Amino acid sequence: MKWRKLSAILLILSIFVTLTTTAGASESNYDRPSEMARGKEVTVKVMSFNIRHGVGMDGVLDLERIASVIRDSGADIVGLQEVDRHYSARSDFEDQAKKLAEALGMHYRYAANLDRDPLEPGGKRRQYGTAVLSKYPIIQSQNHLLSSFGAEQRGLLETTINVKGNHVQFYTTHLGLTLEQRLAQIDEILAITGQYDRTTIITGDFNADPASEEINLMKTLYQDGFSDQNDAYTFPANLPRVRIDYIFLSESAELLNKSTIPSLSSDHLPIIGDITLKREAPFNNGR
């Protein structure tokens, strides 16, 4: 009897020691996130491209040419302007953002700045606007309509993209044709984009040259990625003589290996560059 009691006591003690040791190890690992290995730096190639609904300088609609330019560039994230969705015969009523995303194997978000009724009852709405393509997951998006003073409606497409644990704010826009419109629109862009404390990239056709009042206003908060290449002209594509397409960056980022891409697939030349994201805390990816 005594032997049985002693065996039972020893068994209970053994179980208690095992459970205590296991619990202690688990809690210890959880409480030491600072000892986790830092993630490696990630370099992403970003592009801005006004595609003129896929019509090249030869007047031919050819969306595959646009896809080929993006594919050959190796771009990871792309801001597109002048993108049609079931808009009209000029683009064969296609959903151009979807078609490009499928051709390239990329995620996408589309933003309609013009949103018109179908030509026939029950048809698809006819839309024109901007889009973002990304090799990385797009975890949030929103289109902000900008003040346009009765002229063609403009907007700012906002996306949050998860680049291997880094949450990046990526935007694209296409500003108006008058100084009054652009100044008001940039004021709104600065207010919208300034709320995040993370890497921010703003791409687009700003319809303004680098010395303009509008671009100087943008530079109060963001870097012009091509500020040292003011001769990187983007329009018109067959004889570029003005720089109106931009990649703006938050102060913590830097645009490297930047260039325009010679192409007659649109009336604008695409611009591209590399941005290195530094992962400070891979275990804390929120705001």
Image (cartoon, helix red, strand yellow):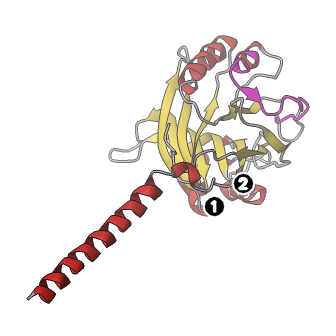
Residue 230 visible to the viewer: yes
Which image quarter: residue 171? Answer: top right
* Circle number at residue 264: none
Crowdedness near tag 1: few (<14), some (14–19) or many (≥20) residues, C-alpha within 10 Å: some
Q: Which residue is mark 2?
A: 70
Looking at the image, residue 164 lies above or below residue 268: below
Residue 131 at x, y percent in the picture: 58, 43
Residue 21 at x, y percent in the picture: 37, 67
Q: Nearer the viewer, residue 163 or 39?
A: 39
The residue segment tinted magenta is 216-234
Crowdedness near tag 2: few (<14), some (14–19) or many (≥20) residues, C-alpha within 10 Å: many
Which image quarter: residue 164? Answer: bottom right
Q: Residue at x 11, y 86 (%)?
A: 2
Q: Residue at x 90, y 37 (%)?
A: 239
Q: Which residue is mark 1?
A: 104
Q: Are marks 1 and 2 in contact (CB under 8 Å)?
A: yes
Q: Nearer the viewer, residue 166 or 189?
A: 166
Residue 95 visible to the viewer: no
Q: Secondary structure at mark 1?
A: helix
Q: Residue furthest front?
A: 2
Q: Main secondary structure of the magenta part?
A: loop
Q: Residue furthest left?
A: 1
Q: Residue at x 73, y 56 (%)?
A: 65
* Kind of residue indicated by mark 2: Ile
Which image quarter: residue 81? Answer: top right
* Kind of residue indicated by mark 1: Leu
Looking at the image, residue 5 lies above or below residue 49: below
Looking at the image, residue 85 lies above or below residue 219: below
